[in-house]
Image (cartoon, rainbow, N blue to C red):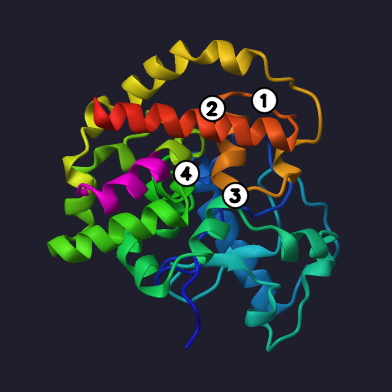
């Protein structure tokens, strides 16, 4: 059985957010639905008839290889992909074959790390979205949710199982998971630390999440003088051999891109004390 992917989450829905590989910054397919629907129909017709398939430049939001994959005109994707051509990869015809084969958004990579039943659980938040809406980071809650990372998503799924909650009940009880006001990659490490404490001592629902984030910021600001002494030189943080949530905290919460390993570990130690203090207060 094929493993569930964020690219084909449902039989009648696909994600084509990354296509084509050359797009303007901040581009969203959802802003151009009418023109893209026409284009995708035309691309499918040309591909099936094998007419007008000369090499063409791929720019902006246009690619002649991107079109409807099924007669019902529901799923959208690469007409040149090997799965559409009996295993033959024709993406090199666009001039971006290697890039097309390589690219996978951060959220899809996080999704791939989840257990299969966890993927199915969280996927339900996007059930009913058509391919255009599923492919839009503005309309698909999974693009926000996945940035919390596997540890947090697995933990809340396990908690939901114990409570016999659906996915909608989970996000109702824990709205910060999808509220859009936090950057998950900045906050995933503090939340991970809180979850580990909760698993040992208290249930997740007993943490005062409404005040957790503002209190962490307040307590962190009280020890910021310790962080100010940390040098912002050294290796790029993303290249260090530490867990991703720690890298993300330094990069997205502190806004520091370079720091040596010893100092990064010192940051984690300070944060752990801050979070424990918040949970005990």
Q: Residues within 10 Å of mark 2 (few under 14, many from 20)?
A: some
For image coordinates 72% across by 52% down, the residue present is 21
Spatial separation of the CA atoms under disc 4 and disc 3 = 25 Å
Report the residue marked by disc 3.
243
- Residue 178 appears anywhere in the view: no
Spatial separation of the CA atoms under disc 4 and disc 2 = 21 Å
Spatial separation of the CA atoms under disc 1 and disc 2 = 8 Å
Spatial separation of the CA atoms under disc 1 and disc 3 = 16 Å
Q: Is residue 96 above or below residue 186?
A: below
Report the residue marked by disc 4.
137
Report the residue marked by disc 2.
253
Q: Quadrant of residue 144?
A: top left
Which mark, residue 186? none
Report the residue marked by disc 1.
256
Q: Along the polypeptide, which appears first: circle 1 or circle 3?
A: 3
- In the figure, is residue 157 to the left or right of 268? left
Out of 13 and 221, give the one closest to the viewer. 221
- Residue 179 appears anywhere in the view: yes
For image coordinates 68% across by 74% down, the residue present is 81
User: Which callout, 1 or 4, points to the residue nearer the camera?
Assistant: 1
- In the figure, is residue 127 to the left or right of 208? right
Q: Is residue 256 above or below residue 101?
A: above
Q: Which residues are magenta?
A: 191-203
């Amino acid at each position: 059985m094929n493993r569930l992917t964020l690219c084909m989450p449902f039989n009648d829905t696909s994600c084509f957010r990354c296509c084509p590989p050359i797009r303007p910054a901040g581009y969203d397919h959802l802003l151009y639905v009418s023109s893209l629907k026409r284009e995708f129909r035309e691309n499918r017709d040309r591909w099936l008839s094998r007419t007008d398939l000369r090499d063409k430049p791929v720019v902006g939001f246009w690619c002649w290889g991107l079109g409807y994959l099924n007669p019902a005109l529901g799923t959208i994707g690469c007409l040149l992909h090997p799965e559409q051509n009996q295993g033959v990869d024709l993406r090199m015809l666009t001039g971006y074959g290697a890039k097309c084969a390589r690219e996978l958004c951060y959220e899809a990579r996080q999704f791939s790390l989840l257990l299969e039943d966890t993927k199915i659980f969280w996927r339900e938040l996007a059930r009913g979205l058509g391919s255009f809406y599923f492919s839009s980071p503005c309309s698909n809650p999974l693009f926000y949710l996945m940035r919390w990372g596997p540890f947090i998503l697995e933990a809340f799924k396990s908690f939901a199982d114990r409570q016999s909650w659906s996915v909608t009940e989970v996000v109702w009880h824990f709205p910060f998971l999808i509220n859009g006001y936090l950057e998950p990659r900045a906050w995933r490490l503090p939340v991970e630390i809180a979850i580990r404490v909760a698993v040992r001592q208290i249930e997740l629902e007993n943490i005062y999440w409404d005040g957790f984030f503002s209190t962490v910021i307040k307590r962190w600001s009280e020890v910021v003088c310790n962080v100010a002494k940390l040098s912002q030189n050294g290796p790029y943080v993303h290249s260090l051999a530490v867990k991703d949530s720690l890298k993300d905290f330094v990069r997205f919460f502190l806004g520091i891109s370079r720091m040596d390993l010893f100092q990064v570990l010192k940051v984690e130690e300070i944060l752990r004390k801050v979070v424990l203090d918040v949970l005990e207060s």
